[in-house]
């Protein structure tokens, strides 16, 4: 049995006390949430010694992949965050010497964000470390178990999306 975070354990105990139906589904939900929180904590601990948060790491990844740099609005779109959030993340990355803001050669009013040499070095180091960490998360699962887990998670996600669409209609 996976360990539940204390808050979910308390909620599950209350659900049992109230004799709510389908306690197994409630437990599965809380297990999933507890696992996601543990993964987030581990990821944050991996990134923190390098002055990175998940948001800053994502921007480094996107900028490294872009090569020639990206406009801030494009970064926000690809990262799935607001332009204001991207601006704050970029300010911190620039303070740390990891990115530079340049005028776009095609449109001098527009900006293009590029990694500095220091940013490229950190990105390369962190991508390798992050990749090993992610691989380690699922190291105890066989390839068949990984595919089965992916299928099951996809099935849950599809059900959530269908219920959301039905509720919106």
Image (cartoon, rainbow, N blue to C red):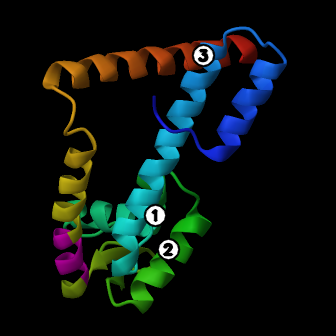
| Res 80 visible | yes
Mark 3 or mark 2, whichever is nearer to me: 3
Give yes or no for contact between labels 3 and 2 (Cβ–Cβ under 8 Å).
no
| Res 104 visible | no
Query: Which type of secondary structure does the marked residue at label 3 adopt?
Result: helix
The structure residue drawn at horizontal position 46% and vertical position 33%, both measured from the top left corner, is 2
The C terminus - image quarter: top right
Image position, residue 147 (x, y; %):
23, 20
The structure residue drawn at horizontal position 42% and vertical position 49%, both measured from the top left corner, is 39
Q: Which residue is mark 3?
A: 25
Q: Quadrant of residue 95?
A: bottom left
Above-or-below relation of 58 to 94: above
The N terminus - image quarter: top left
Image position, residue 108 (x, y; %):
40, 80
Depth check: 19 or 126 in front? 19
Image position, residue 50 (x, y; %):
33, 79
Give yes or no for contact between labels 1 and 2 (Cβ–Cβ under 8 Å).
yes
In this view, the residue farthest toward the right is: 18
Residue 151 as seen in the image, left or right of residue 163: left
Q: Is residue 123 magenta?
A: yes
The structure residue drawn at horizontal position 82% and vertical position 21%, both measured from the top left corner, is 17
Q: Which residue is mark 2?
A: 89
Residue 53 as seen in the image, left or right of residue 162: left
Callout 2 crowding tier (Cα within 10 Å): few <14, some 14–19, many ≥20: some
The prevailing secondary structure element of the residues shown in magenta is helix
Range of residues picked out in magenta? 119-125
Above-or-below relation of 45 to 101: above
Q: Which residue is mark 1?
A: 55
């Amino acid at each position: 049995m996976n360990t539940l975070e204390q808050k979910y354990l308390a909620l599950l105990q209350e659900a049992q006390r109230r004799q709510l139906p389908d306690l197994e589904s409630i437990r599965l939900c809380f297990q999933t949430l507890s696992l996601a929180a543990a993964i987030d904590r581990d990821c944050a601990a991996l990134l923190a010694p390098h002055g990175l948060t998940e948001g800053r790491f994502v921007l480094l990844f996107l900028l490294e992949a872009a090569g020639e740099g990206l406009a801030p609005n494009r970064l926000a779109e690809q990262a799935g965050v607001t332009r204001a959030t991207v601006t704050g993340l970029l300010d911190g990355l620039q303070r740390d010497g990891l990115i530079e803001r340049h005028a776009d050669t095609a449109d001098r009013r527009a900006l293009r964000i590029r990694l500095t040499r220091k940013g490229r070095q950190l990105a390369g180091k962190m991508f390798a470390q992050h990749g090993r960490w992610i691989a380690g998360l699922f190291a105890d699962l066989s390839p068949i178990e990984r595919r089965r887990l992916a299928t099951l998670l996809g099935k849950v996600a599809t059900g959530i999306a269908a219920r959301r669409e039905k509720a919106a209609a």
